[in-house]
Amino acid sequence: MRLSLSKVCKALSAGLSALLGAGLVSACSNDGKVAGGTEAESTFALQVQLADGSPAPKARIRMLPGDFLSDGEISAEWVESDADGFVEMAAEPGAYAVEVRNVRDSRASGAVLKFTLDSNDSRIDTVRLGELSSIEGFVFLGSEAPVIRVVGLDRFVVPDSSGHFVIDSLPAGIFDIHVADAAEKNSATLSFVPGDTLYVDCTDPESEIKVFKNREPVASKYPGKDWSEHDALLAQMEGYAVGTLGAAGITDTLGNISRADGEICVVTTTDDYLIVEDTTDVDSAGNAKTSAVIAPGSLRDCAYREGPTWILFEKSGTYNLQSPLRLKNDKTFDGRGRDVRFAGMGILTETSSNLIFENITFTAPAITVLDTSSRRALSIHNRSHHVWVDHCTFEEYPLVELDVKRGSHNVTISWSRFENAQTGVLFGLSGDIIKDTAQSLTVHHSYFAGLSRDGVLSHGGVLHAYSNFFDGVELSGVVCSDSARCLVESNVFNNEMAVTLYRWYNEDGSPVDSTVGFVAMKDNLFTAGGKPVDGDALGYKPDYEYGVDFADADNAWIVRTDSGAQ
């Protein structure tokens, strides 16, 4: 739906989604007299009922004009229903919104009823209480922080510095959400139906309103040992990882990948190692010697298989790695249709190639101290190549969640989430350790939020970042340093610093020229004060075909909701 208006906020992004509980409002009109009413005034009588239809005594009721917009001050007192759930009010003719709240056994419920009173009208209505929930969303902030209000209800909300807001204690219903900047120079009123998604972008006062409906949730399906499902997965690959076959290919001694028949290994246990006793080796006290062996049917058991292996998971669960999992070539880790979580010591590649990680959540690291010894969730090292990380979630790590370095190349990260760390993706090592021009990385349609430093930190090599959403990253969305060449296109940056070109700055704030990178920026959207950086990345352009989505709020919401493990 589009509503074109001049000088209004642009309702585009920030994802306003509601998870409203079920409620029921029923009403009937009565042309007869209501006790206590007169022919000279309009009266309104209401019975409040609990969800089961029984009366709700001492429920709280407040009636406001239907076009009411709160100014943050209390505007109307609550009245209570009597022992039979009834309340009666007199009012001038006009449109009204009645909000009802009730607390019973420490549980709150509510309802909203909208109606019009005619002159000399007497009206009796019944309202049935339902569960309460909230509308939670984000706005892209402009120079003035907007105010979010619900038309007809006493709700006045100012988003926080990241644009996040919550309108709480709402029952099921249809609400008009009013958005205005702090000075009320520009405003827009948008009809909101539970289940819709509303995007609000107040960065451009000269624009139009757009309302986007919620996309149907896309849940992954268990492939069920069907190799055609593996081929269908490969068909979705873009970027530098194209040519990766995972379990459907084999890598030769020269690093070339060709088609091959792989085996299927189903992970059947969340155990990692088992402790076994050797009864032939007993000490003087009668204690048998023990050793740790890889648990049969474990993640480690499947990962250490020789040859191409498609690793599936019999059940959802957390697979806790008691030591780093060092990978062999030609593997597909496929968590589709399951809630598969890798925890513990993380995964390492050592000149390992032709790898796919699909629909995996990396969580709960074994090392949580904030120092350089902390393991990454996934480390792609030492000239590893053709690695695809797709629809993975990186929940929390102390420093870096995923790194690609030491000559690793032809890596793609797509439709993944990076949250709650210092840096989401580290690409390469700093230039004073190693100068690497061979490494290559594509990052597309991924979501970066809750990071105390950077989204993607690149040192050298070539980086192509497109159609990502950097949402409130504290320092830079992308760092392009140490002679890295970076093409940054069609991303949404909801943070003050979109791209940084230097790794080091002097005490006086001047950049250290030896740490500079080279960037080309194209068709990005800046919603929180960020701005483009001039440059042509020394002529860098990727040599593959790819699909870029237009950088707007619709795409930002799609990335935010559809990225990560499904």
Image: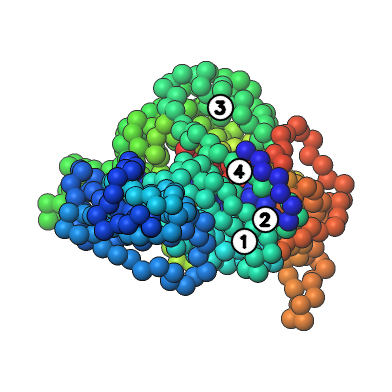
How crowded is the residue under tag 3: few (<14 C-alpha within 10 Å), some, or many (20+)? some
Q: Are marks 3 and 4 in contact (CB under 8 Å)?
A: no
Front residue of 391 and 462: 391
At x 85% / y 57%, what residue is drawn?
534
Q: Which residue is mark 3?
A: 233
Question: Which mark is in front, 3 or 4?
Answer: 4
Answer with mark 4 or mark 2, whichever residue precedes in sequence.
2
The CA span between labels 1 and 2 is 7 Å
Q: Are marks 1 and 2 in contact (CB under 8 Å)?
A: yes
The residue at 56%/35% (across/down) is 355
Q: Secondary structure at mark 1?
A: strand
Q: Secondary structure at mark 3?
A: helix
**In x, y percent, where is residue 76?**
40, 68
Earlier residue among tags 3 and 4: 4
Front-most of residues 48 and 488: 48
Q: Which residue is mark 1?
A: 180
Q: Secondary structure at mark 4?
A: loop
Inter-mark Cα distance, 4 to 2? 12 Å
Circle on res. 211: 4
- Residue 38 visible somewhere in the drawing: yes
Tell me where residue 286 appears, x and y as whole percent: 12, 51
> Can you say which quadrant of the picture contains the N terminus?
top right
Mark 1 is surrounded, within 10 Å at the Cα level, by few (under 14), some (14 to 19) or many (20 or more) other residues, namely many
